Image (cartoon, rainbow, N blue to C red):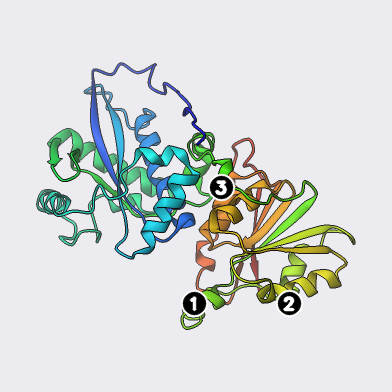
Amino acid sequence: MEAHQNIVRNYTSHLDILETIPVTIVCQLSGEMGNNLAKLGHCLSLKWWLESGAFYNSTHKIGYSARVALRHQEHSKWVRGAKDLQRCFPNTNRFDFSEANNEDFTDIWKIQHQMFGGDERVGAQSPFSEINTNDKQKIATGLRAFTTAIYEKHAISYNPTSKSNVSMPFLFANNFQLVDSLADQFYEESRHFFLFNETCCKEKADPDENVFHYRNFKGEMPKVWESYGFHEVSPLQAANLFGHLRDGDKIAIVTRFSRESALPYVEAFEQRGFKVRVIEGQDGPADFCFLMSAKKEIAGMMISTYLMWAGYLGNASRVIAYSLASSNHIHSVPTHNATSPGLKGKFDFRVIQ
């Protein structure tokens, strides 16, 4: 398995730090690989921001050292999600995916509830919940409140089941990081941490091949996809996403379902004169690798953390991320204009009527 050293940056070398306080970010995971990437990405960005000196206490000359502790969801799909992450993103092997899934952590949660408020139920509303958003100003408000509380009442609780220390207070992070301001600020750190293990790949996109990700929520969730607002483009609308391409240009369709389910899209693309193939029969990480490997354009649903993170970590020159106006998710269209080299101008967000 590939190994990789993280970027080593001393953000606080110019600060006069007399004390570095250890703090804990409890990271609530959910879903499969794409969702877990988005959740863990947010938690790591919080860690890097706390350690950057942005919240340095100049009066008392205090800095922070942050540790991420994972808590998996109760649904059994967490097992596959964790295995995929650990196999394909080697740096995640440093984590215990069950660290905060035990009665001792429940007791620690209740202590925090008594001291700082929030909901007594584990995983519900927690103190400093402003961090669970993609609005950088709100996140900063939550982190400032947290560091103030840390200075006033800092303590360490020991979890004997996990054999780990948890700061009191701790942060409980339960947010999906997509292409927001923190993803932009820590783009280089994220790409280094989430280095992909090439042994998880099977096929890769041709250098001159565009890729369409057919998520097919309707096929996966036939009873609830519509009520959840998981609306996908029609074959004609999908062809329009690539309307700027020329006759003879190549498109690969990636889907977790059979080739037959994608045939209407194949036909729509071929009617435009595109050369089309369907990538099928791979597992989730292999499809993720295929999307990451594309050097031209990839397109797919904005709500798909899988597509968004493949675009964020991958090599595509442009990521067309769409949402249908008929869905329940157009309010979450990212508005941040990225400035990081490699990310600036990469994402093309579209709302389709």
Label 1 Cα neighbours within 10 Å, binned few <14 / some 14-19 / many ≥20: few
Spatial CA span between label 3 and label 2: 29 Å
Residue nearer the viewer, 229 or 83: 83
Q: Does residue 134 appear in this view?
A: no
Q: What numbered label is drawn on residue 221?
A: 1
Q: What numbered label is drawn on residue 91?
A: none
Quadrant of the frame with the C terminus: bottom right
The amino acid pointed to by label 2 is Pro
Residue 126 screen position, x and y as percent: 23, 55
Label 3 SS: helix
Q: Does residue 106 appear in this view?
A: yes
Residue 264 screen position, x and y as percent: 73, 77
The amino acid pointed to by label 3 is Cys
Tag 1 and tag 2, C-beta contact below 8 Å: no
Label 2 Cα neighbours within 10 Å, binned few <14 / some 14-19 / many ≥20: some
Q: Place residue 199 in its image quadrant.
A: top right
Residue that badge 2 annotates: 264
The amino acid pointed to by label 1 is Met
- Of all residues, the one furthest to the bottom in this rendering is 223
Residue at (49% x, 56% y) in the render: 34
Label 2 SS: helix
**Of the residues tagged 3 and 2, which is closer to the observer?**
3
Spatial CA span between label 1 and label 3: 26 Å
**Of the residues tagged 1 and 3, which is closer to the observer?**
3
Spatial CA span between label 1 and label 2: 19 Å
Residue that badge 3 annotates: 200
Residue at (23% x, 54% y) in the render: 101
Tag 3 and tag 2, C-beta contact below 8 Å: no
Residue 100 screen position, x and y as percent: 23, 50
- The answer to whether 94 is drawn above or below residue 134 in the figure is above
Q: Looking at the image, is mark 1 or mark 3 earlier in the sequence?
A: 3
